[in-house]
Amino acid sequence: MKRYLNIIPALSLLLVLISCDAISQKKSDVRKVKLVAPKGKAIAAFAEGCFWCSEHIFESVVGIDSAISGYAGGNVPNPTYDLVNTETTGHAETVLVYYNPKIISYAELCKIFFASHDPTTPNQQGPDRGSSYRSILFYNGPTEKAMAEQAVKNISTSGRFKKAIVTQLKPLTEFYRAEEYHQDYIEHNPNQGYVKAVSMPRFELFKKTYKGKLR
């Protein structure tokens, strides 16, 4: 599992790939989140590559209260960032979105999902490679499953992507909040190399692609 930092030495503009472990913290404050929304709100989860980017994107949309970076879709309890890095837990970097269903629907969230990443690259999103970066559309119950299936059909026939959609559909059964330093990472680290080179260009592309209301 890798991200890269933009390092600019005196006479170089070279992008250097380094392991995310370089910024990981040994103390783990990962915790399992109860999948119960506050009164009048709803929750949904999406895996679409780097959760730093996804969190920032979803929180920019009107109707979304907040997004949490974390891990879902795996088979190992209490995964840490370093453990997910091994690509052996089955987890993907995921955002848990809290939203107001009176303002924005699950179907619209699916549109945000497909507008904010490339769903045709298996186990990869941009420079990030590994199963923890795979594309997953999580759903709660049969109604959302049908809506998720329709969203995949819609994007598949839209002509936007030339390659086949590889997005997985999975029920949302567990979600683990990632270590605290991952939360609102872009807000707290706007000048970090990966953020400047990957996250923000991805966000700018999303703003050009998505037709909904942004803050």
Image: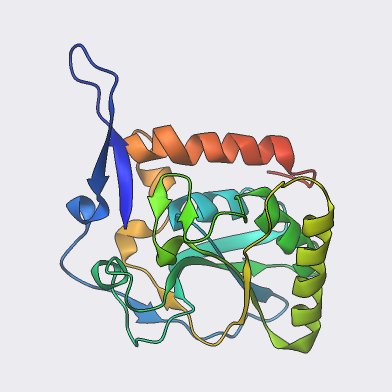
Residue lying at 45% horizontally and 54% vertically, measured from the top left: 50
Is residue 156 placed above or below 213 in the rendered structure?
below
Q: How is the image coloured?
A: rainbow
Name the one closer to the observer, 86 or 55: 86
Residue lying at 50% horizontally and 36% vertically, measured from the top left: 200
Inspect this view and state whether residue 210 appears.
yes
> Horizontal placement of 179 versus 187: left or right?
left
Name the one closer to the observer, 205 or 87: 87
- What x and y, as percent, mark residue 110? 72, 63
Is residue 215 placed above or below 141 in the rendered structure?
above
Residue lying at 18% horizontally and 51% vertically, measured from the top left: 22
- What x and y, as percent, mark residue 84? 32, 70
Residue lying at 77% horizontally and 88% vertically, measured from the top left: 142
Inspect this view and state whether residue 105 appears.
no
Is residue 14 placed above or below 114 in the rendered structure?
above
> Horizontal placement of 175 versus 170: left or right?
left
Q: Quadrant of residue 86?
A: bottom left
> Horizontal placement of 150 versus 25: left or right?
right
Tell me the quadrant of the picture where the C terminus can be found.
Answer: top right
Tell me the quadrant of the picture where the N terminus can be found.
Answer: bottom left
